Image (cartoon, helix red, strand yellow):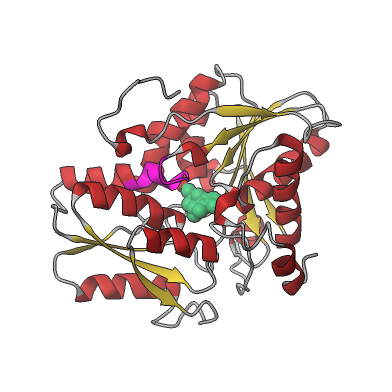
Amino acid sequence: MKTKKIYENIIDTIGNTPIVKLNKIAEGVKSDIFAKIEFYNPAGSIKDRIAKYMIEDAEKSGKIKPGDTIVENSSGNTALALAVVCSLKGYNLKIVIRDSTSPDKLKILRALNVDLVLVDSTLPPESPDSYNNLAPKIAEEIPNSYYLDQHNDKKNNEAHYMTTGPEIWEQMEGQIDYFVAGIGTGGTICGAAKFLKEKDPNIKVIGVDPVGSIFYEYFHTGKKTKPSSYLIEGLGDEFLIKCVDFSVIDDVYQVTDKTAFEMTRKIAEKEAILAGGSSGAAVWACLKLARKIDRPARIVTIFADSANRYLSSIFNDSWLKEKGLL
Ligand code: PMP
């Protein structure tokens, strides 16, 4: 937990987030559900951990030096985390982001003066200008630039193996039966799961994937389905990516936008925790698991970011109605 009285700078406050027991939400199931509250990080999400870890690792290995430009594609949270880390460490930053990203996230990014390249979210994945293809192309064009590549560089997983996993193990005093987390880049779930399973091989790990993403189908059938659009931000993908290591995942549940968003609002109402859409997805999966096993177990999950990133979307009835979700 954050105990120091004075930190040298804001980057030093990353990590050591609290774990909170969910009470009213878990009424009626035999298991206990615990959430690690990652919006306590300074840029407001779990992605602060990888921004710090991956930039410092690239510095140590001589891949980057202050004055260089970091290029990355992000659903918003990595962009915000990099904005903080790059600003303090003296790097330029260029972010490729979908035009469908929540207006709240875009406003915060603009407040931090982040150089954004908005991509058309309806472009097919194979388009050279799509979200996944544009960032490496831009990095090639800018001199002294570095493509972070959080989706494929396993340093992402290592950040969670070194921080998120050990924190969970210590905070739970080794008493964990299940670890449940959304799969975005896969860094959180696979990095933390690797650590936790090394400590206790009996811990089971459940991933959560939105309808429209390809991970659920791939995990269960080994086949790649055609991706389609969905509204949960930060989870799922249209490609298989290297940071998703299925060898440490025991099961994958599939969640709809509607279910995830209803649960996100329920978390605010019942627990007074203002968490984001992927947290709703994660809690829905924890409850599904708890009902399935129907026995006392300790389930830990991740609240990756906060509701303040989705005030114009998930917490806005007109937006939900417009999307046919209310
Ligand atoms: N939730 C949110 C809101 C996110 O932004 C992300 C990051 N993509 C995740 C969950 C998943 O984290 P990871 O990329 O480590 O799988």
The image shows residue 80 at horizontal and vertical percentages of 40, 54
Looking at the rendering, in which quadrant would you find the C terminus? bottom right
Q: Residue 21: image x %, image y %? A: 67, 27
Determine whether, in the image, residue 74 is placed left or right of residue 179. left
Q: Residue at x 16, y 53 (%)?
A: 63
Q: Does residue 38 show up?
A: yes
23 shown above or below 43: above
- 207 vs 226: above or below: above
Residue at 72 percent of width and 72 percent of height: 323
Magenta stretch: includes residue 11: no
Task: Please say if 87 is above or below 135.
Answer: above
Question: x, y (%) of residue 170?
Answer: 49, 20
Residue furthest to the top: 173
Q: Residue at x 57, y 43 (%)?
A: 249
**Is residue 43 magenta-colored?**
yes
Quadrant hosting residue 161 = top left
Q: Describe residue 82's horizontal placement relative to residue 255 as left or right.
A: left
In this rendered view, identify the residue nearer to me: 261 or 141. 261
Q: What is the span of residues highlighted in magenta in the rendered image?
A: 42-51
Q: State the count of labels.
A: 0
User: 148 left or right of 232?
Assistant: left
